[in-house]
């Protein structure tokens, strides 16, 4: 595997340009300042607020009034606003734990500045010179030790000197004694505290407490160890040495990062340029296939660093947030963003990184979803709307666009995909089934039959988008509707996976039969007058034809209903995307990432490559963070998934290699290693002049596979655990 280094030639000029390290539960952002170093810190359970007291009395009856209005063909937004506004809650934010600041005694200009992040080892560093002294800082977050560690060294003895302090926007206490700094912070809404322990191990100098600060003078080396804990005591582990701790971390981190790789051939001399300059070259019309390799690994790095073990799942900013009140609360948006965070977990060979998501679904969302289903809708099962937090919030939030009950059903897809990529009946029965069954039960109770005999959903929305409706001579923009296309697609997929699960497990034959009957009564997808896939049941115009959400494309990706076996719908999606982009679509990072995945599924390598260029040109910050704006991590994750989807697809019964290779000559030669295909198959391949010359397949179990390579179809048998190499001329 190549050594992937994210190189920056500048100190961070703002939080979004800092360097992230993390171990799932803990995160830190390294600013890399010469005169003042800042480590902004996070602990994933540090959320303001708490469980909200829901007020659901009368909601179901008022919702029925809104539904009746929609069934009459009217704009129901005003009525819904009047009747339902008291039921729309607002949740609180994920919060920063604060900043450890090191004010350096050495001053003056620096030369030879480098800020690097080794993506394979998970180690960040800063190096520079001041006069005749070279300084180095090394930072990582250890998953085995659950500690953030930093070392400061110089190539001249006694040159390390600084004053350390700790600040936080809200409610912090600091106590310093000897070489230990103890911090305590309170969330903005009160009620939740975190504890921090920061130890400074100084070699060759002095370390003295000075009120709330700690002064280091004349040191050769300083090692800093940070532990954080919300609602509990932070405990620093016994540490033999910094080198031993780092070696343990690198062995742990690199073993997982080394599983998968995308390696387009490129001139490696370009690696000498900082990311900012490489992005500028792309904006000027150059192609940088090496940056695609780096970006794919950065997406893997961010997920491994923010979603692992007993952590919470990655939120809108992973585990990193520099705010007490974060953009969009750095919460769990479930109308695409949380789901997109895990699109690459399976194909990029990071399956265990999805475990925190499944834990969150079953242990946080399920009970809250059952409560909302029962009290708001008078239905059985569980429901989730467009956002949540760590308190199991599942009710409608924010406004009319939050009256969208599909979040939980969409999350079921992550569980089903996890099973498809590594078939395991125990996982299906004990982890996936409880939530999948509850979501299915809700929709079986919730849906209603229209005058044509179709089962319908709603009031709902096509996420965050509006359409023009005409009634009584008026033309108005509206959110609310019945059975938007995305609802139909998600529910159809939910019923399909539930029926297949019941067939495999045989748990509830009666409910399986009910789901089969409901599945048969779902409305068909429709093609509009412009040849596009309709976003709503009627062929409406929309006030934002370039809207960032492309919700009705769900059935192409991440769903599977639209595929090469449905050519008319594939053409309709193609037209949909063309119309969206002609009106300015794909202007946010995550939306652009979604478009790359959609073009990959369409097999349109040129368009997929063009969208990667757009992503790098318009929606990528100098440290490779995705820019919504501001930073949202889902674009990083979604684009990493797309970069794999362009090279390997398995959503039908065929494993296809290079289904959407970009047409630019820069992508003509390369290889990928360790990508995962559905059915429990690990795939590697090499290609030259756009043709696969060899591939290597390893299956978890004995099985027969069907491949599509260089336009030809092949069938082969794989023995469990035995790698088979196939050569192609």
Image: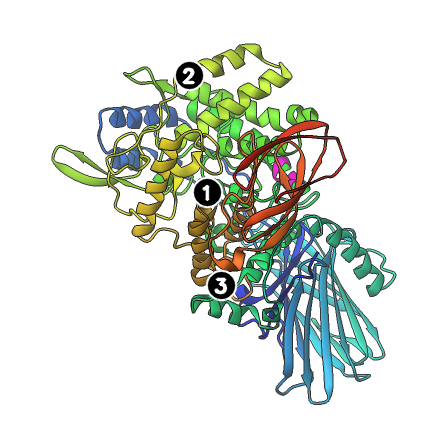
**Disc ID at residue 108:** none
The part of the image, by quadrant, that contains residue 482 is top left
From this viewpoint, which residue is outermost toward the left?
A: 473
Q: Are marks 2 and 1 in contact (CB under 8 Å)?
A: no
**Disc ID at residue 603:** 1
* Residue 585 percent coordinates (x, y): 35, 51
Tell me where the magenta segment starts and ends, as one range: 353-358
Q: Could one spot residue 394 in this view of the protein?
A: yes
Image mark count: 3
**Disc ID at residue 287:** 3
- Quarter of the image with the N terminus is bottom right
Q: Does 24 appear above or below 531?
A: below
Q: Could one spot residue 322 in this view of the protein?
A: no
* Residue 280 percent coordinates (x, y): 47, 70
Which SS type dominates the magenta stretch? Answer: helix
Residue drawn at point x = 39 percent, y = 45 percent: 549
- From the image, tell me which residue sits under label 2: 520
* Residue 330 percent coordinates (x, y): 52, 51
Q: Who comes first in sequence, dot 2 or dot 1?
A: 2
Q: Who comes first in sequence, dot 2 or dot 3?
A: 3
Between the C-alphas of marks 2 and 3, the distance is 48 Å
From this viewpoint, which residue is outermost toward the front?
A: 729
Q: Is residue 691 left or right of residue 118?
A: left
Q: Secondary structure at mark 1?
A: loop
From this viewpoint, which residue is outermost toward the top?
A: 510
Between the C-alphas of marks 3 and 1, the distance is 20 Å
The part of the image, by quadrant, that contains residue 397 is top left
């Amino acid at each position: 595997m190549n050594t992937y280094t994210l190189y920056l030639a500048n100190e961070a000029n703002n939080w979004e340009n800092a360097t992230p390290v993390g171990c799932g539960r803990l995160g830190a952002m390294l600013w890399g300042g010469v005169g003042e170093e800042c480590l902004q810190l996070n602990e994933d359970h540090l959320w303001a607020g708490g469980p909200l007291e829901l007020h659901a009395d009368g909601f179901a009856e008022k919702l029925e009034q809104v539904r009746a209005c929609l069934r009459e063909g009217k704009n129901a937004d005003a009525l819904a606003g009047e009747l339902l506004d008291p039921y729309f809650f607002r949740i609180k934010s994920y919060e920063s734990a604060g900043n450890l600041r090191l004010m350096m005694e050495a001053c003056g200009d620096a030369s030879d500045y480098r800020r690097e992040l080794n993506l394979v080892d998970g180690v960040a560093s800063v190096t520079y010179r001041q006069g005749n002294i070279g300084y180095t800082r090394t930072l990582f977050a250890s998953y085995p030790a659950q500690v953030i560690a930093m070392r400061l060294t110089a190539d001249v003895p006694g040159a390390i000197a600084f004053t350390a302090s700790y600040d936080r926007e809200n409610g912090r206490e600091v106590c310093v004694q000897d070489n230990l700094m103890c911090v305590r912070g309170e969330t903005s809404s009160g009620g939740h505290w975190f504890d921090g322990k920061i130890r400074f191990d100084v070699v060759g100098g002095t370390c003295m407490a000075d009120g709330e600060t700690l002064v280091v003078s004349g040191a050769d080396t300083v090692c800093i160890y940070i532990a954080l804990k919300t609602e509990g005591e932070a405990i620093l582990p016994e540490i033999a040495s910094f080198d031993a701790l780092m070696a343990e971390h690198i062995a742990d981190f690199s073993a997982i990062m080394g599983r998968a790789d995308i390696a387009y051939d490129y001139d490696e001399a370009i690696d000498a340029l900082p990311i900012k300059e490489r992005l500028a070259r792309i904006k000027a019309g150059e192609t940088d296939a090496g940056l695609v390799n780096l970006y794919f690994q950065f997406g893997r790095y961010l997920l491994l660093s923010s979603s692992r073990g007993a952590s919470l799942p990655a939120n809108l900013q992973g585990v990193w947030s520099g705010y007490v009140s974060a953009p969009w609360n750095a919460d769990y948006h479930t109308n695409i963003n949380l789901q997109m965070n895990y699109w690459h977990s399976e194909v990029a060979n990071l399956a265990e990184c999805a475990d925190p998501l499944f834990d969150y679904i079953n242990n946080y969302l399920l009970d809250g979803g059952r409560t909302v289903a029962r009290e708001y809708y008078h239905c059985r099962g569980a429901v989730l709307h467009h956002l949540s937090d760590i308190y199991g919030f599942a009710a409608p939030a924010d406004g009319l666009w939050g009256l969208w009950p599909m979040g939980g059903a969409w999350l079921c897809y992550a569980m089903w995909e996890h099973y498809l990529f590594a078939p395991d009946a125990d996982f299906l029965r004990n982890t996936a089934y409880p939530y999948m069954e509850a979501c299915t039960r809700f929709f079986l109770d919730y849906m209603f039959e229209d005058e044509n005999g179709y089962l319908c959903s709603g009031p709902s929305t096509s996420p965050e988008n509006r359409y023009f409706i005409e009634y009584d001579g008026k033309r108005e923009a509206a959110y609310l509707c019945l059975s938007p296309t995305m609802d139909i697609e998600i529910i159809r997929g939910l019923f399909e996976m539930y029926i297949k699960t019941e067939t495999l497990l045989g748990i509830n034959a009666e409910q399986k039969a009910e789901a089969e009957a409901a599945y048969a009564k779902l409305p068909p997808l429709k093609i509009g007058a412009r040849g596009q896939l309709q976003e709503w049941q009627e062929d409406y115009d929309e006030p934002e034809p370039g809207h960032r959400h492309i919700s009705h494309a769900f059935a192409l990706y991440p769903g599977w209903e639209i595929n090469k076996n449905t050519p008319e719908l594939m053409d309709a999606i193609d037209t949909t995307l063309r119309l969206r982009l002609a009106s300015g679509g794909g202007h946010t990072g995550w939306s652009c990432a979604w478009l790359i995945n959609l073009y990959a599924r369409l097999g349109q390598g040129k368009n997929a490559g063009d969208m990667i260029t757009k992503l790098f040109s318009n929606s990528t910050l100098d440290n490779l963070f995705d820019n919504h704006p501001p930073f949202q991590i889902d674009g990083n994750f979604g684009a990493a998934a797309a970069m794999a989807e362009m090279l390997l697809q398995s959503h039908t019964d065929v494993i296809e290699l290079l289904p959407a290779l970009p047409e630019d000559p820069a992508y003509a030669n390369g290889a990928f290693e360790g990508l995962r295909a559905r059915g429990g198959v690990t795939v590697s391949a090499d290609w030259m002049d756009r043709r696969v010359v060899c591939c290597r397949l390893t299956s978890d179990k004995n099985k027969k596979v069907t491949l599509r390579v260089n336009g030809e179809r092949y069938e082969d048998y794989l023995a469990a655990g035995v790698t088979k190499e196939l050569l192609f001329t």
